[in-house]
Image (spheres, grey):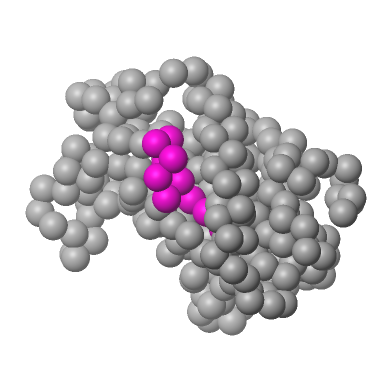
């Protein structure tokens, strides 16, 4: 099957990460994955939620899409007086993924909230939020070290996310919307730099899928996540101490 943008079946879309995109957050970046664009901002607060264990910190995320991030205008969540189920599910995924990157005891009693706002959506917004969200998080932690609030970074692992799917019986990496909307199988995979899986979401959209097909999609995601980690390292200024 020939892909709409001419990519190979195992090829990522063009990825660009622009750091310090916003002035005020402790860490920020704009991540562009093809036509998908997500603004990620990490904010530090010197307090933690009540449920957090004494002496440890917390990392969480919020996710939303601008009304015209898609082809048709959607209502803002505030207009509905509650977070949409999709946004709630995605921000929990992003929060879990980013917490896996951090030594919460080393972070100390502070909270880092990573806001992921989709400026334009063309598939893969949740995985772009994880990949870009980590860069914003790492920049915020670096600032804490530079300002003397922490002796060393609490970052333990890089974290990246990418999708793969089966479209017209063809496995492929990093689905854009025209592919994602027709996918028979959709899989999202979040990994660290050791190649370990942090989160795996696989759904038979049009049909069930076999373990063999799942493993094939996982191999594609492993390749994509490995390439995304190199892009993150470049955006963050090369090799960091936890890598």
Residue shown at the point (30%, 42%) measured from the top left? 102
Residue shown at the point (74%, 67%) measured from the top left? 183
Residue 26: x, y in percent?
42, 36
Residue 239: x, y in percent?
44, 18
Residue 63: x, y in percent?
53, 60
Work out which residue is located at the far front of the displayed protein and give it. 212
Residue 121 in sight: no
Q: Quadrant of residue 194?
A: top left
- In the visual, does 216 lie left or right of 145? right
Q: Quadrant of residue 178?
A: bottom right
Residue shown at the point (13%, 57%) measured from the top left? 53
Residue shown at the point (24%, 41%) measured from the top left? 103
Q: Is residue 76 magenta?
A: no
Toward the viewer: 206 or 243?
A: 206
Compared to residue 239, the image places residue 175 above or below, namely below
- In the visual, does 95 lie left or right of 19? left
Compared to residue 221, the image places residue 154 above or below, namely above
Q: Main secondary structure of the magenta part?
A: strand
Residue 86 in sight: yes
Work out which residue is located at the far top of the displayed protein and give it. 238
Residue 177: x, y in percent?
77, 60
- In the visual, does 32 lie left or right of 143? right
Q: Quadrant of residue 16?
A: top right
Residues rendered magenta in the picture: 188-197
Compared to residue 243, the image places residue 191 above or below, namely below
Q: Is residue 190 magenta?
A: yes
């Amino acid at each position: 099957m020939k892909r709409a943008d001419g990519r190979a079946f195992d090829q990522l879309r063009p990825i660009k990460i622009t750091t310090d995109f916003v002035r005020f957050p402790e860490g920020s970046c704009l991540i562009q994955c093809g036509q998908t664009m997500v603004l990620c901002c990490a904010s530090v607060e010197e307090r933690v939620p009540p449920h957090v264990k004494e002496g440890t910190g917390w990392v969480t995320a919020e996710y939303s899409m601008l009304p015209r991030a898609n082809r048709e205008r959607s209502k803002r969540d505030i207009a509905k007086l509650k977070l949409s189920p999709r946004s709630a599910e995605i921000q929990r995924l992003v929060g879990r993924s980013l917490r896996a990157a951090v030594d919460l005891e080393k972070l100390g009693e502070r909270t880092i909230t990573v806001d992921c706002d989709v400026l334009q959506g063309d598939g893969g917004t949740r995985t772009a939020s994880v990949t870009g969200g980590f860069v914003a998080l790492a920049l915020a932690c670096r600032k804490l070290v530079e300002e003397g609030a922490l002796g060393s970074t609490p970052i333990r692992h890089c974290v990246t996310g990418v999708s793969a799917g089966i479209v017209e019986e063809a496995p492929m990496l990093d689905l854009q919307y025209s592919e994602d909307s027709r996918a028979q199988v959709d899989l999202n995979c979040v990994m660290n730099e050791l190649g370990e899986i942090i989160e795996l979401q696989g759904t038979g959209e049009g049909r069930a899928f076999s373990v063999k097909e799942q493993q094939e999609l996982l191999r594609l995601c492993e390749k994509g996540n490995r390439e995304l980690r190199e892009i993150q390292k470049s955006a963050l200024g090369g090799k960091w101490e936890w890598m």
